[in-house]
Image (spheres, coloured by chain):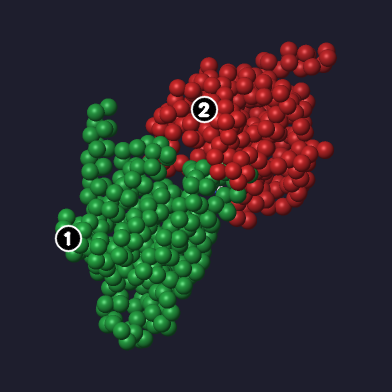
Chain colours: A green, B red
């Protein structure tokens, strides 16, 4: 407890970081329900590698990573979604190609143009796995993330019913005059935004955990869309808070701590789900 | 002007034509049944009319200011995943979405219409149940209620009664007939030739080539119908005389 209070008092950014981590997890989880149901979980993974590639380029050119990574990832998200709806190219193969390609490209750039301030492995490590400790998060990132998170939350609540309709039955939505294409693109764009935000915090490899685990946990127990959304939002916030506390107390890396917390919660929900269906 | 009109219309998949030279029109208040054997392209025709896939040639004209958000659609099959969490109510009310514009929530009128349609199809007590845990016939009724929520002018139904028990099938036909008498135009794919003849005002019979399009009473006299009935071994031939007599006396 004392360590916690000490951290909160000594490092003002810790307070913001906790807030932002919670917001990012929340956004990822809300979006995750839709992505998992649309069989887009792998897109999150592929995009996080694109973001990694873009970040490496930005680091090499000494730009602020987010300004490069954001547009790049969003554009790739929209493109990947297009490929997905075009039946001739295999969706998962395309994702694997883009994902591996960006990873290789990013690491190559990091090696060819090493930054002066830190070592290659440290750079790669922090982009892939996130900041090693919670104090490493920069204040400018925190503010940007908070703004983006609120935008994503607003968009999600505003288009909630449309997102449901497009996720549940795209053909029906299109046939009856809902512009499914627009909402799919919207989902792709906010996916891109969430991934870039999350990458600063938890690193590109662990983003999939934030996106998929809350949704999968909630789906073990709940059977309606609304309940699943609400439950995964709670799981995300809970895991983010518990995860940060653990990572402060045990000085473990932020990303993997939160990811592991999510996995533990999934285990619990799996059991509850099994008990529930066993009782019937 | 016709609500839907096609001229030398052809449809198919990836360069492979399934039906060509299709000429028919649907006027406001019509009740069109589309019949034909399995694989003759009925569902494909529905999807092409709805813009879910592109046509291969010819012209498709929508008249009377028909907008997409005035169409209700019941697909033959939905690709819902095994594990999709959605309650029956959530599915039904998603049909109302096409008229809410940018407004983020459902109005009380839309909620009312969802409840009304669920009651109409006798699925009120399924409202909170998980859609994927319903039986095939129950799911079909949920999707029908959704289609009813979406339509105000035109209802496109792809085999609406498949999987329904005889009682509900009968109720279904009455509901559709009632809607039709209230001015909703019906386009329906059906294998139930008996019911098609009984309820429809027009019949379109397709089989790679359009075999017949016209009023139901003319269809009954056509060779296409006689051949189709003999091969399908139903004893419908027996019902022709009284039906056509009745029409002639008019
Ligand atoms: N996605 C597809 N790609 C290529 N060909 C298809 C596709 N879907 C259907 N077909 C072919 O198009 C033809 C017409 O199919 P359609 O589903 O329209 O038949 P239908 O008249 O609705 O049959 P049913 O009575 O069984 O519902 C069939 O020969 C089928 O093999
Ligand atoms: Mg069909």
Marks 2 and 1, how far apart at CA: 59 Å
Q: Which residue is drawn at 66% across and 37% down?
A: B71
Q: Is mark 1 within 8 Å of ligand 1?
A: no
Give the residue pinned by disc 1.
A3
Q: Give residue B19's quadrant in the image.
A: top right
For label 2, the residue is B141
Q: Where is residue B181 in the image (x, y as percent from the top left)?
A: 72, 22
Residue shown at 20% from the left, 62% from the top: A6
Q: What element carries label 1?
A: helix
| Nearer the camera: disc 2 or disc 1 | 1
Which residue occupies the foreground of this view, B228 or B125? B125
Q: Residues within 10 Å of mark 1 (few under 14, many from 20)?
A: few
Residue at left 24%, top 66%?
A10
Residue A182: percent from left, percent from top: 58, 54
Q: In this view, does A203 lie to the left or right of A144?
A: left
Ligand 1, seen in the image, is in the quarter at: top right
Q: Name the residue nearer the viewer: A212 or A69.
A: A69
Q: In which quarter of the image is the N terminus of chain B?
A: top right
């Amino acid at each position: 407890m004392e360590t916690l209070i000490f951290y909160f008092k000594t490092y003002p950014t810790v307070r913001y970081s906790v807030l932002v981590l919670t917001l990012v997890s929340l956004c990822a989880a809300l979006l995750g329900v839709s992505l998992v149901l649309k069989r887009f979980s792998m897109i999150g993974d592929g995009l996080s590698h694109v973001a990694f590639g873009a970040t490496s380029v930005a680091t090499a050119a000494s730009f602020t990573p987010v300004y490069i990574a954001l547009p790049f990832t969003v554009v790739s998200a929209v493109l990947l979604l297009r490929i997905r709806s075009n039946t001739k190219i295999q969706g998962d193969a395309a994702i694997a190609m883009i994902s591996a390609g960006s990873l290789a490209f990013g690491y190559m750039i990091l090696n060819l143009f090493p930054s002066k301030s830190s070592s290659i492995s440290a750079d790669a490590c922090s982009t892939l796995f996130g900041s090693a400790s919670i104090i490493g998060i920069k204040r400018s990132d925190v503010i940007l993330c908070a703004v983006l998170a609120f935008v994503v939350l607003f968009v999600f609540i505003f288009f909630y019913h449309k997102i449901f309709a497009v996720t549940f039955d795209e053909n029906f939505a299109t046939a009856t005059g809902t512009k499914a294409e627009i909402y799919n693109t919207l989902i792709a764009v906010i996916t891109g935004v969430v991934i870039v935000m999350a990458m600063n915090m938890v690193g590109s490899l662990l983003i999939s955990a934030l996106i998929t685990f809350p949704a999968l946990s909630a789906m073990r127990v709940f059977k309606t869309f609304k309940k699943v959304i609400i439950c995964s939002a709670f799981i995300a916030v809970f895991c983010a808070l518990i995860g940060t506390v653990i990572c402060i107390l045990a000085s473990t890396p932020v990303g993997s701590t939160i990811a592991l917390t999510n996995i533990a919660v999934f285990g619990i929900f799996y059991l509850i789900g099994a008990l529930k269906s066993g009782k019937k | 002007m016709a609500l839907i009109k096609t001229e030398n219309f052809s449809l198919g998949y990836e360069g492979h034509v399934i039906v060509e030279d299709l000429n028919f029109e649907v006027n406001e208040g019509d009740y069109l049944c589309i019949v034909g054997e399995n694989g003759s392209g009925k569902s494909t025709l529905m999807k092409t009319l709805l813009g879910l896939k592109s046509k291969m040639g010819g012209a498709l004209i929508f008249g009377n200011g028909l907008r997409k958000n005035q169409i209700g659609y019941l697909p033959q099959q939905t690709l819902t995943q095994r594990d999709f969490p959605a309650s029956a109510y959530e599915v039904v009310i998603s049909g109302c979405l096409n008229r809410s514009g940018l407004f983020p929530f459902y109005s009380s009128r839309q909620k009312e219409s969802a409840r009304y349609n669920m009651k109409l199809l006798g699925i009120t007590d399924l409202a909170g149940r998980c859609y994927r845990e319903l039986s095939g016939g129950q799911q079909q009724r949920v999707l029908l209620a959704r289609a009813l929520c979406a339509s105000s002018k035109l209802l496109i139904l792809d085999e609406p009664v498949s999987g329904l028990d005889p009682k509900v099938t009968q109720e279904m036909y009455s509901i559709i007939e009632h809607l039709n008498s209230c001015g909703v135009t019906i386009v329906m794919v059906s294998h139930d030739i008996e019911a098609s003849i009984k309820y429809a005002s027009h019949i379109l019979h397709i089989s790679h080539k359009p075999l017949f399009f016209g009023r139901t009473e003319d269809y009954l006299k056509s060779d296409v119908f006689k051949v189709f009935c003999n091969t399908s071994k139903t004893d419908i031939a027996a019902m022709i005389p009284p039906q056509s007599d009745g029409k002639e006396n008019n």
